[in-house]
Image (spheres, rainbow, N blue to C red):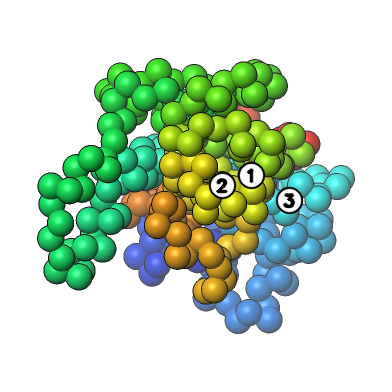
Amino acid sequence: MKIYIHTKFEASEVSVIKEQLAGKYEVLIGEEILPENREEQFLSADICFGNVPLAWAKQTSKLQWLQLHSAGLDPYQQLENHTFQLTNLKGFFGTSVAETAVAGILAMYRGVGHLAKLQTESKWIGTPLRSSLHLLSNAKVLVLGAGAIGQKVKDLLVGFNCETTVLDSKTVVNLDEYLPTTDILVATLPETPETIGLLNKTRLQMLKPSALFVNVGRGSAVDEIALIELLQQNKIYGAVLDVTAKEPIPENHVLWQMPNVLLTQHTSGGWAEENLDKIKFFIENLARFEKGKALINIANLARGY
């Protein structure tokens, strides 16, 4: 059987893959194949690891299983009548994304961004800054999304004695009753028809002036124009944005210059051993495939995760 590796890995990581699969499979590494020949090689494969172009996935008649290197399913939700199994990395990024969310909250509350800027300017302000800082401890936090990220955010906040409420796909209908009293709103939502535009202008305006908004889910969940207006008018305290409507953000975008915004540039899913852990997950799922067992994280295209 042939395995096509579409994900771009470092040479040392490719070596790990080859060592793990040696003697059992014909391994095709996309990065080692001329770009014009990659589609043809993919179409000859039985298994694929990586987010190949949607057009390739639509054409294949031989593929038995496609393991994505992402939790998100876009654009594969457009697949129709595919015969191969499709798995993703649902839950894989829970810890790293949650840690970025909490780190962002602390950075905003404790003035880390401003202090870092002062350090580059060799400028000492000291005591006058103290009254501008805030405590995470005992904050009232509302987390949208009860998946791995949302649950991990809640776990991390236990140590800060926060009052944390997590709303899932069923209880999110009660969102409006929580917003006016929320100190920190954390969105960890995937992109689905139900989540697109969920945090519209009306809902954002329900937040109190001291509220902090954190988005580590998808940019499509929030009305970004309305959010920027609230931030410019200081009608909310600030925002930590790992995701935005358009990525990367254009160089002239207003978000770059806003002092009450922390941009983490969609890095929350990353860590030094990320690729090696992805490879480990794939190898473990491959062992299940070989034994005819149910694969981990079979994607639900209709639900979007």
Quarter assignment of residue 6: bottom right
Spatial distance from mark 2 to mark 3, Cα to Cα? Answer: 35 Å
Specify which label sits upstream in the sequence, 2 or 3.
3
Please say if 1 is above or below 38. above
Q: Which of the two discs, 2 and 1, sits closer to the camera? A: 2
- Total number of numbered discs in the rendering: 3
Residue 48 placement (x, y as % from top left): 62, 55
Q: Specify the quadrant of the image occupied by residue 179.
A: top right
Residue at screen point 60% across, 81% down: 34
Q: Nearer the viewer, residue 35 or 100?
A: 100
* Disc 3, SS: helix
Residue at image coords 48%, 47%: 234
Residue type beneath disc 2? Leu
Find out whether the residues at labels 2 and 3 contact each other: C-beta distance under 8 Å.
Answer: no
Task: Indicate left or right for 146 with 137 as reference.
Answer: right
Q: Is residue 222 left or right of residue 9?
A: right
The three-letter code of the residue at mark 3 reads: Tyr
The residue where tag 3 is placed is: 76
Give the foreground label among 3 and 1. Answer: 1
Residue 60 percent location from the top left of the image: 79, 58
Look at the picture and state if 189 lies above or below 257: above
Which of the pair 230/30 is nearer the observer? 230
At label 3, counting other C-alpha atoms closer than 10 Å, the crowd grade (few under 14, some 14-19, many 20 or more) is many
Give the labeled residue for mark 2: 230
Where in the figure is residue 152, as x and y percent of width and height?
Answer: 41, 29
Distance between the alpha carbons at the discs numbered 3 and 1: 22 Å
Nearest the viewer among 24 and 69 is 69
Q: Position of residue 235 (x, y in %)?
A: 52, 42
Residue for badge 1 = 222
